[in-house]
Amino acid sequence: MEHYFTNNNNLKSEFRTVVFKYGDELTQFTSDLGVFSKDKIDYGSNLLINTYFKNGRKAVKVLDVGCGYGIIGILLAKYMQTKSTLVDVNKRAVHLTNINIKNTGVDAKTFESDIYSSVRETYDVIITNPPIRAGKQTVLNILLGASDYLNNNGELWFVIRKDQGAKSIMEKLKSTYNLETVEKSKGFFIILAKKH
């Protein structure tokens, strides 16, 4: 089965528009087949974005890992003045993110990277809605691997569902990070992880 974290060159294209509402303001994103949550912003990402808006740091250097069509990193750049870098293993996701960066006019850049394979810098914040369907090992590689790319006092923000192994994943992260559950809703946890 094809997943959104693989590249399928035979996949046809059917562009669609996804809208994020913040206050009275709408931000439009171009989406397509072959990317995660192509028709609407999924509950977990929405919760992660809005929780970061309330509790996150402004004007910092951010890396959005597994960015899809770019909603998290772009919205943080737009509303939190972050300098966002967005990466994804999926070429189509990176192409869509480029379109959305251009259309929103934010200070952001994107490139293709299998998790951190092409990442050369360090960041104040790494944020992710990890691709659970890619398997637990991939999720752990994203979450544990973040520690090598965080600046001093850096923060990892992520969303995870209780029924998708949140407890066991958090257990594995405890030796690397101090973990705080910032928000809980409908079985989703927003976790803030700081390096020891």
Image (cartoon, grey):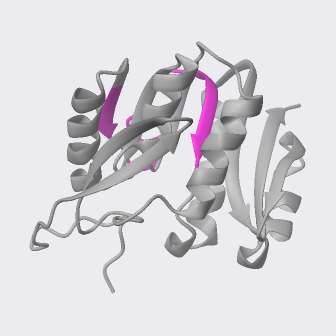
Q: Is residue 182 left or right of residue 43?
A: right
Instruction: Name the spot of residue 183 as percent of width and height, x first.
Output: 82, 50
Total labels drawn: 0
Visible residue check, residue 152: yes
Q: Is residue 70 above or below residue 185?
A: above
| Of 125 and 103, the residue lying toward us | 103
Q: Which residues are magenta?
A: 109-129
Instruction: Name the spot of residue 111 as percent of width and height, x first.
Output: 30, 36
Q: Is residue 66 above or below residue 38?
A: above
Q: Is residue 162 left or right of residue 61?
A: right
**Residue at figure coordinates x 16%, y 60% from the top left:** 15
Is residue 121 inside the magenta stretch? yes
| Of 20 and 178, the residue lying toward us | 20
Q: Quadrant of the N terminus?
A: bottom left
Outermost front residue: 24
Q: Is residue 171 above or below residue 151?
A: below
Outermost top residue: 59
Q: Quadrant of the C terminus?
A: top right
Visible residue check, residue 145: no
Q: Is residue 154 left or right of residue 88?
A: right
Q: Is residue 144 left or right of residue 80?
A: right
Instruction: Name the spot of residue 5 as percent of width and height, x first.
Output: 37, 64
| Of 132 and 18, the residue lying toward us | 18
Instruction: Name the spot of residue 163 as percent of width and height, x first.
Output: 76, 79
**Residue at figure coordinates x 31%, y 67% from the top left:** 6
Q: Is residue 191 above or below residue 41?
A: above
**Residue at figure coordinates x 23%, y 46% from the top left:** 96
The image quarter in which residue 177 lies: top right
Is residue 58 inside the magenta stretch? no
**Residue at figure coordinates x 89%, y 50% from the top left:** 174
